[in-house]
Image: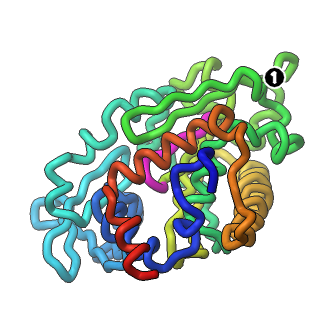
Amino acid sequence: MTSGSLLPAEAYWSPVWFATERERLFRRCWNLVGTLDDLIGAAALVADVAGTAVCVERDAKGGLRAQSDEGDVGVGVWCDHVFVCPDPHATSTSLAAWLGEFPHRIGGFEPDRLVEVARHRFELAANWKLFVENHIDVYHLGYLHRESLRAYDHRRAQWTTCGPHWVFYEPPCDGVDVHDEQYWRGLKPIEGIGEDRWGSGAHLVFPNLTMATGAGFFMTYQCTPIAPDRSLVDLRVRAERGSDPQAMLRLSRTIIEIEDGAACEALQATVRSPAFSVGPTARDHELPITRFHQQILRTMGDAPVRSYEMAE
């Protein structure tokens, strides 16, 4: 690959890269494993984190405890969302410290005040990083989503990094009536969210928790790697009580599963080609991806390159 990317093509298909990411990336980060609602009526919440089964359950005092075959695992909660960190050395950094200013930078959304109104899971025939990179690539919005996101002004989009995380917002286009019933797609206005956040928000909690926010919803769609070239996307929508999520869910599936998903799978089909490269404009127009790569390499250290060279 050219200077437009910091990762080699092998990072998207090599089993060695996949195994090294599990050990040196996901085990060192806080991973979303579910919500407090998932524990209602259940003895425990069980999730696969970096190839290890992690069990989260209530302790005698009503708090949370997480364990794997290796022993206790770090566990934390943000707005009813349950996270775990398998590496005992990494858990010296609490979940709150890991998130930093991120919760205060996404526009006042408090998902614990909302209820889950829809959930959809689908498998993606692509490496998880391609999905995340597509999510944070501002450049593609006016092309890939020309019709599905036509209500938003991509030219006025703004993004920023927040520690290892990423925050994005773009307003509605001039002339779009944000009070029209069609704009809300069956959802109710979220209390406390001003019109300055009635556009499209897109965010990333590093490494793989992608989010979207809007006038009437808070959505997570985490992309979990299950193989070097396969991922599982878990889309969950929260909204005010009484919202009808069906129209919003149809639009979200069009954008995330059909449009973004097809683009990621098409890229996955090319990464083994010796002609695969990143164009010269990527350095400027896809800067969020470069920042994403920098954080991956910073977290993993030099292990990926050494491991791949030894394997080959």
Task: Judge left or right: residue 9 versus residue 140.
Answer: left
Give yes or no for residue 50 being in the magenta stretch.
Answer: no
Label 1 secondary element: loop
**Magenta segment:** 201-208
Residue at the spot of label 1: 173
Counting from the top left corner in percent of width and height, residue 245 is at: 69, 51
Q: Position of residue 216 (x, y in %)?
A: 64, 37
Corner quadrant of residue 196: top right
Q: Report which quarter residue 275 is drawn in.
A: bottom right
**Which residue is nearer to you in this view: 130 or 298?**
298
Residue at position x 14%, y 50% from top? Answer: 92
From the viewer's perspective, is residue 102 above or below residue 147? above
Amino acid residing under circle 1: Cys
Q: Nearer the viewer, residue 200 or 300?
A: 300
Magenta part, dominant SS = strand
Viewer-side residue, 188 vs 7: 7
Residue placed at 72% from the left, 71% from the top? 273
Nearest the eye: 65 or 245: 65
Instruction: Write the residue at 39% across / 41% down.
Output: 164
User: What x and y, as percent, mark residue 169?
Assistant: 62, 29
Residue 37 in the image, given as x and y percentages of width and height: 40, 60
Q: Is residue 294 above or below residue 175?
A: below
Residue beneath the point at 52% across and 50% down: 6
